[in-house]
């Protein structure tokens, strides 16, 4: 175990990049500048703002302040994060090629997904187009990022069928806690997002202002995403609806043709004002690839949905707690295949649940974060680190640890494994009622 001891050392904060003077900055520059300001405004009776984020770490995860217009969101996103978007395109092309796909085939698939997404969700397509124009990349390349789940997991399915001595170690561990399980009576979701190591540093948080009432439009939300991808796959909206996700692999992946992509479904979940509306994007149509959706509501409701291409199975919390990794637990109409390439999924979920149950009824963020830092069976642990035996384009780490307080509408996130990166707080509401210490 000595070889992994270095993980437990907390790294020194990375210095924040210098920010240019206000005069002459573009709108994207100003959006990123706002990302590095304290999260809360001035409180009454105080001159100085109170920050939810340690000032030395505020630049680790960029925060984009965006509005209701999809083209403007895409323009700011694309211009501000152009370099990170280009890097993500290169990362995914390399990953797909490592799975045996040719670049020509990838781009051909991406072109087809572009047309499908535009027809399926026009607003999503508009935002993708604006990201492409502002970043200087092609619409096809941006579509590749937004359909990368379908392309990725079809590649993983191929690897699973031919699993040999070079096992892939990919996965996420997600957590759902109802009020009876938490110390403060709040509903919480969380996950360690374990993904390609090269994606670290190419992610961001967005706070999107659209509407605070259903009659005025889609709800505001704060969420975590990858540069170049529309919406958020982990986040909480103004209605108190929250989302976390896990990848699954089954032999049925890719057999149902093109269906609404995973990332479009995630966006539509956070577009919902009601819980039934949040479930609909998952269950109302078949899917191209399997995935797990953990959806919660601040009124004290959580449902975990194991969604294969043709079927769904549902897990409710037991004693206020539900935990999921990357293999099927409830769905029995098809075969789970992720464990063939990532057997770590078989212990991450049960271990995380067992560790959390020690605190049942008094789970708070420190207790949850302790579990998220667990290194049992490192590097293939709940807190994931790169396996040096794997090729660089296949190495997986905990790119971000996410905690969602659905009652307070706050997203806490790390830039990297939670054993070495601090949690930063991103409240949806920035008035004085939401200003707690991170």
Image (cartoon, grey):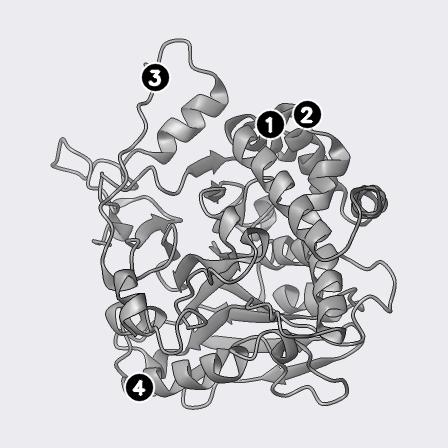
* Between marks 1 and 2 in the image, the one whose residue lies nearer the viewer: 2
Q: Can residue 68 be seen in the rendering of this structure?
A: no
In the image, residue 49 sits, relative to residue 428, either above or below, namely: above
Q: Residue 288: image x %, image y %?
A: 79, 64
- Ranked by sequence position, the earlier of labels 4 and 1 is 1
Q: How many marks?
A: 4
Q: Secondary structure at mark 4?
A: loop
Quarter holding residue 285:
bottom right
Which residue in the protein does label 1 denote?
75
The Cα atoms of the two marked residues, 4 and 1, are separated by 45 Å
Which residue in the protein does label 4 denote?
360
In the image, residue 40 sits, relative to residue 164, either above or below, namely: above
Labels 3 & 2 near each other (Cβ < 8 A): no
Which residue in the protein does label 2 denote?
133
Q: Which residue sits at x=28%, y=71%? A: 370
Labels 1 & 2 near each other (Cβ < 8 A): yes
Which residue in the protein does label 3 denote?
20
Q: Secondary structure at mark 2?
A: helix
Q: Is residue 175 left or right of residue 112?
A: left
Q: Secondary structure at mark 1?
A: helix
The Cα atoms of the two marked residues, 3 and 2, are separated by 24 Å
Quarter holding residue 229:
top right
The Cα atoms of the two marked residues, 1 and 2, are separated by 7 Å
Q: Which mark is residue 223?
A: none
Q: Nearer the viewer, residue 242 or 396?
A: 396
* Between marks 1 and 3 in the image, the one whose residue lies nearer the viewer: 3
Labels 1 & 3 near each other (Cβ < 8 A): no
Q: Which residue reaches farthest top? A: 24
- Ranked by sequence position, the earlier of labels 4 and 3 is 3
Q: Is residue 397 left or right of residue 142?
A: left
Q: Can residue 357 be seen in the rendering of this structure?
A: yes
């Amino acid at each position: 175990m000595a070889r992994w001891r270095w993980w437990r050392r907390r790294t020194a904060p990375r210095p924040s990049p210098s920010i240019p003077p206000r005069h002459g900055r573009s709108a994207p520059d100003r959006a990123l500048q706002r990302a590095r300001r304290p999260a809360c405004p001035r409180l009454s009776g105080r001159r100085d703002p109170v920050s939810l984020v340690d000032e030395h770490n505020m630049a680790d995860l960029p925060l984009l302040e965006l509005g209701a217009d999809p083209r403007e969101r895409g323009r700011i996103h694309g211009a501000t994060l152009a370099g990170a978007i280009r890097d993500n395109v290169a990362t995914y092309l390399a990953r797909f090629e490592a799975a045996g796909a040719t670049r020509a085939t990838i781009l051909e698939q991406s072109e087809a997904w572009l047309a499908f997404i535009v027809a399926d969700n026009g607003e999503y397509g508009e935002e993708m187009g604006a990201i492409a124009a502002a970043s200087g990349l092609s619409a096809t390349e941006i579509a590749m990022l937004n359909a990368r789940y379908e392309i990725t997991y079809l590649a993983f399915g191929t690897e699973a069928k031919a699993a040999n001595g070079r096992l892939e170690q990919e996965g996420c561990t997600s957590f759902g806690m109802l009020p009876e399980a938490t110390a403060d009576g709040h509903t919480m979701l969380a996950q360690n997002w374990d993904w390609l190591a090269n994606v670290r540093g190419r992610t961001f948080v967005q706070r999107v202002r659209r509407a605070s009432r259903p009659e005025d439009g889609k709800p505001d939300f704060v969420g975590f995403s990858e540069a170049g991808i529309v919406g958020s796959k982990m986040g909480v909206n103004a209605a108190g609806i929250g989302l976390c996700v896990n990848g699954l692999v089954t032999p049925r992946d890719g057999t149902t043709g093109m269906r609404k992509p995973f990332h479009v479904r995630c966006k539509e979940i956070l577009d919902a004002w009601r819980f039934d509306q949040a479930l609909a994007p998952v269950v109302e149509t078949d899917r191209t690839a399997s995935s797990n959706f953990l959806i919660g509501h601040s009124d004290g409701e959580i449902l975990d949905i194991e969604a294969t291409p043709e079927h769904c199975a549902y897990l409710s919390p037991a004693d206020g707690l539900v935990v999921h990794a990357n293999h099927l637990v409830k769905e029995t109409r098809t075969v789970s295949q992720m464990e063939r390439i990532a057997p770590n999924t078989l212990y991450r979920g049960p271990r995380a649940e067992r560790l959390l149950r020690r605190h049942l009824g008094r789970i708070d963020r420190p207790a949850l974060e302790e579990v998220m830092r667990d290194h049992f069976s490192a590097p293939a642990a709940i807190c994931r680190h790169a396996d040096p035996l794997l090729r660089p384009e296949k190495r997986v780490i905990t790119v971000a640890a996410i905690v969602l307080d659905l009652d307070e509408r706050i997203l806490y996130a790390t830039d990297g494994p939670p054993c070495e990166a601090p949690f930063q707080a991103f409240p949806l509401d920035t008035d004085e009622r939401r200003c707690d210490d991170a």
